[in-house]
C-alpha cells in the first residue's frame, strides 16, 4: 500500500495534538481530526483505533514532549528558587507567544475530566502530581541553600504553586491581559520570597 | 397554546445552565439541551433563539446568581481579610459538596474562550475583573485595619488570588483530592498573612 509509506505515526499524532489542544476532547469530531491530520477516516481508525485511543496517545505524547521534558531540565538546576523562577518566566513567555491562545493541553484536559474515563483522570492527576513533587523538591533545595524562606511548608506551597500554574494557563486563554498574566507570575515568585 | 403556560423562562434557563455547566458550550448539542430542559426543539428556538443566545443568557444568569451575589455579600464585611478567608472557605466547601465535579461555569467558560466570540470573552473578563477588584479592595481594607501586611502590593496580590481561585476550581474537577484543594485554600490565605 504505497500511501501508507508516507504516513508517520508520530507526525500524525502531533497533528492530532494540535486539534485536541485547541478544541478539547468533547468538541473535536472525527472530521476535525481527518481534516487536521490530513489522513482519511479509514486509515485513522486502522492506525489509532477510536477517537478516545487517539486522544490518550496524543495527551501522553504532549505530556512527554512538554511537561516531562521541562521538569527534567529544571530539576537539574541546583538552586530550587532559580528553577521555579525559570518555570514561571517560561509560562509568561509562552502566554506572550501563544497568539491563538491554546493554553496547555494538560490543563485543558484537567477541566474536561468529568467527561473522561478513569485512565485519563489518572494520567492528568499523575502529571500534576509530578509537578507538585517538582515544586516541593525545588522548595526544599532552595530552603537548604537559604534562597527560599525556611518557614514555608514545602508541600502546601507546592500545591498552591500548581494552582497558580493552572490559573495562569486558564486566564491566558483570553480572560486576563498580559499584564495580569505577569502579575500572577510575579506573585507566585513572591510566595517563595522573603517578605 | 396550553403547553406554553407551564413553561417558565428562568426555570428553563436554570436547566440549560446545568447542561452547559457540566458539558461546556462546544460539547453540548441541541438534543442535550432538549433533553436537559424538558422542552421541545421548536419551543427552545422560539423562546431562546440559537444555542449561542441560550448560552449567553445562561452564563449571565449563572454569574448573577453565584459570583455577583457572593461578592456583594462578602464586600459588606468590614475586615477584608475575613472576607477573603470566607471566600476561600466557601470554595473549599463547594468542592467538597460538588460530587459530580461541575466546577465553576465561569472558569469552565474561561478555558473555552478561544471557541467563543468577543461578547462572551468580555463577559468572562469583566466577571473576573470584578473578582480582582473585590480582592484588591478587601486587601486595602485589611491593610488599613492591620489584618493584612502593608508590604503587599494589593493589585498584584489580587490577580494572584484570582489565579488561585481559578486553579482551585479546575483542580477540583478531579485532578487533585480534597487534601490538595484545602492546601490551595490555606496557601491563598498564607499570601495575605504575616510570615
Image (tube, coloured by chain):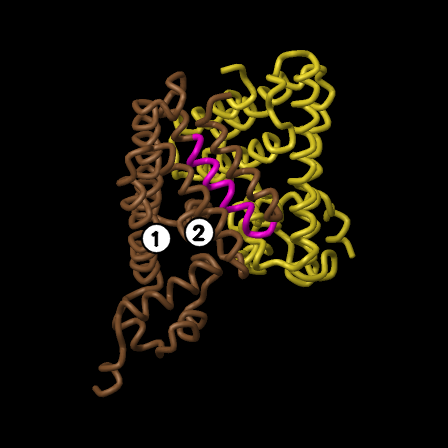
Chain colours: A brown, B yellow
Q: Residue B140 versus residue B128: which sits nearer the camera?
A: B140
Q: Residue B109 versus residue A15: which sits nearer the camera?
A: A15
Q: Which residues are magenta?
A: A160-174
Q: Is residue A29 visible?
A: yes
User: Measuring 75% from the left and 53% from the top, which residue is drawn there?
Assistant: B4
Q: Residues within 10 Å of mark 1 (few under 14, many from 20)?
A: few
From the top left corner, tell me how far across and down residue A2 is, in percent: 22, 87
User: Measuring 55% from the left and 53% from the top, which residue is drawn there?
Assistant: B112
Find numbered disc 2 in the image and state the secondary structure of the residue it sits on. loop
Residue at mark 2: A104
The question of residue A172 being in magenta is answered with yes
Q: Is residue B100 left or right of residue B157?
A: left
The answer for how far apart the CA atoms under marks 1 and 2 are is 9 Å
Q: Is residue A127 above or below residue B150?
A: below
Q: Residues within 10 Å of mark 2 (few under 14, many from 20)?
A: many
Identify the mark nearer the N-term, 1 or 2: 1
Instruction: Tell us which disc is closer to us: 1 or 2.
Output: 1
Determine which of the numbered discs, if any, sits on residue A66 in the image: 1
Find numbered disc 1 in the image and state the secondary structure of the residue it sits on. helix
From the top left corner, tell me how far across and down residue B54 is, in percent: 68, 54
User: Measuring 32% from the left and 64% from the top, which residue is drawn there?
Assistant: A50
Image marks 1 and 2: residues in contact by CB distance under 8 Å: yes
Name the chain letter of the residue that bears numbered label 1. A
Q: Residue B45 versus residue B185: which sits nearer the camera?
A: B185
From the top left corner, tell me how far across and down residue A16 is, in percent: 37, 66
From the top left corner, tell me how far across and down residue B146 is, in percent: 65, 12
Amino acid at each position: 500500500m504505497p500511501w501508507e509509506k508516507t504516513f508517520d505515526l508520530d507526525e500524525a499524532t502531533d497533528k492530532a495534538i494540535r486539534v485536541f489542544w485547541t478544541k478539547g476532547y468533547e468538541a473535536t469530531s472525527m472530521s476535525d481530526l481527518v481534516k487536521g491530520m490530513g489522513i482519511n477516516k479509514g486509515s485513522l481508525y486502522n492506525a489509532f483505533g477510536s477517537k478516545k485511543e487517539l486522544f490518550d496517545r496524543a495527551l501522553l505524547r504532549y505530556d512527554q514532549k512538554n511537561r516531562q521534558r521541562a521538569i527534567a531540565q529544571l530539576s537539574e538546576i541546583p538552586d530550587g528558587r532559580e528553577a521555579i523562577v525559570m518555570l514561571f518566566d517560561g509560562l509568561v513567555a509562552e502566554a506572550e507567544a501563544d497568539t491563538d491562545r491554546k493554553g496547555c493541553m494538560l490543563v485543558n484536559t484537567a477541566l474536561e475530566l468529568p467527561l473522561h474515563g478513569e485512565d485519563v483522570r489518572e494520567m492528568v492527576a499523575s502529571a500534576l502530581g509530578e509537578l507538585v513533587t517538582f515544586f516541593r523538591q525545588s522548595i526544599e533545595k532552595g530552603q537548604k541553600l537559604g534562597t527560599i524562606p525556611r518557614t514555608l511548608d514545602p508541600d502546601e506551597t507546592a500545591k498552591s504553586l500548581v494552582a497558580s500554574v493552572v490559573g495562569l494557563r486558564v486566564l491566558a486563554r483570553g480572560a486576563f491581559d498580559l499584564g495580569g498574566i505577569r502579575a500572577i507570575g510575579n506573585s507566585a515568585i513572591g510566595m517563595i520570597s522573603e517578605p
